[in-house]
Image: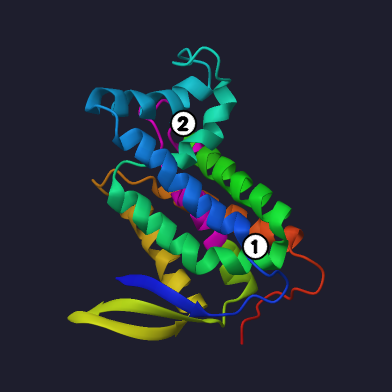
Amino acid sequence: MFLPLHDANSIRHIRFPYVNYGLIGVTPLCFLLQAVLPQAAFDQATIDFGMIPIVVRDIYPQPVPWLPDWATLVTYAFLHADWLHLLSNMLFLWVFGDNIEDALGHTKFLLFYLACAVCAALVHLAFNLNDNGPLIGASGAVAGVMGAYILLYPHARVFVLARLVILVPLPVPAFWMLGFWVATQLFYVVVGSDEPVAWWAHLGGFAAGVVLAAGFRRHGVMLLGGR
């Protein structure tokens, strides 16, 4: 329904959000390494480095003997199923990530991003204890960035491409755009969906982002800003 294009929210505390851009560079690189593999090897990589609940719970042995079970709580966030999955996540990170890095600082932003990925995976695990399928994708970590944004800059204008019969570019407050996104995730959690989407991971990452941003933000960054 809404595809973010950019926001009217300049950075104030850093010169360049190199951690955010680094994540936007490294994540596609990981996918490219997957994409050049034969299909069988591509699928095996998602099993080896995706987050599989029964593996993390030590019910089933880790496919990669040298990789600790807990490591996939992070590595899964750098794998994607296809180009659309990857590009949609990177677009949201591009629009919202620079301001969160600005608000937290470089090091804290990296720790924040990885922590949101872990929290998203743990929430997914909690609601899928006996699942043997791999969770992959940066969606949970990116949802954490979105959660931080709605807490710190709910009034910032986000220019979105909205589907109103035809595609129309519109400026909307971040609260409405991101609030609609959260409502969509909740809707599919309640009514169910046949789509292979980790709705609980999205909600877990988003909630983690809201909570962590409140404590990670640098001194002087106010809550509920962006006017």
Q: Residue at 57%, 70% (x, y): give it.
A: 150
Give the crowd class for mark 2: few <14, some 14-19, many >=20 residues within 10 Å.
many
Q: For the C terminus, which image quadrant?
A: bottom right
Residue furthest out toward the left: 165
Residue 206, visible in the rendered structure: no
Decide which of 131, 82 is in the foreground and name it: 82
- Image check: 219 left or right of 184? right
Residue displayed at 51% across by 34% down? 75
* Image location of residue 69, percent across then percent down: 55, 22
Q: Position of residue 174 (x, y in %)?
A: 50, 77
Relative to 111, is 8 on the left or the right? left
Residue neighbourhood size for the residue with mark 1, other residues' Cα within 10 Å, grouped as few (<14), some (14–19), many (≥20): many
* Residue pointed to by mark 1: 101
Q: How far apart in space, not on screen, are marks 1 and 2 (Cα)?
A: 26 Å
Which image quadrant is residue 81 in? Answer: top left
User: Which residues lie in the magenta part?
Assistant: 126-146
- Residue type highlighted by circle 2: Met
Q: Which mark is residue 51?
A: 2
Q: Amino acid at mark 1?
A: Glu
Residue 136 belongs to the span the image colors magenta:
yes
The residue mark sitting in front, 1 or 2, is 1
- Classify 168 as above or below 70: below
Image coordinates of residue 172 in percent, x first then y, are 44, 84
Residue 56 falls inside the magenta stretch: no
Disc 2 secondary structure class: loop
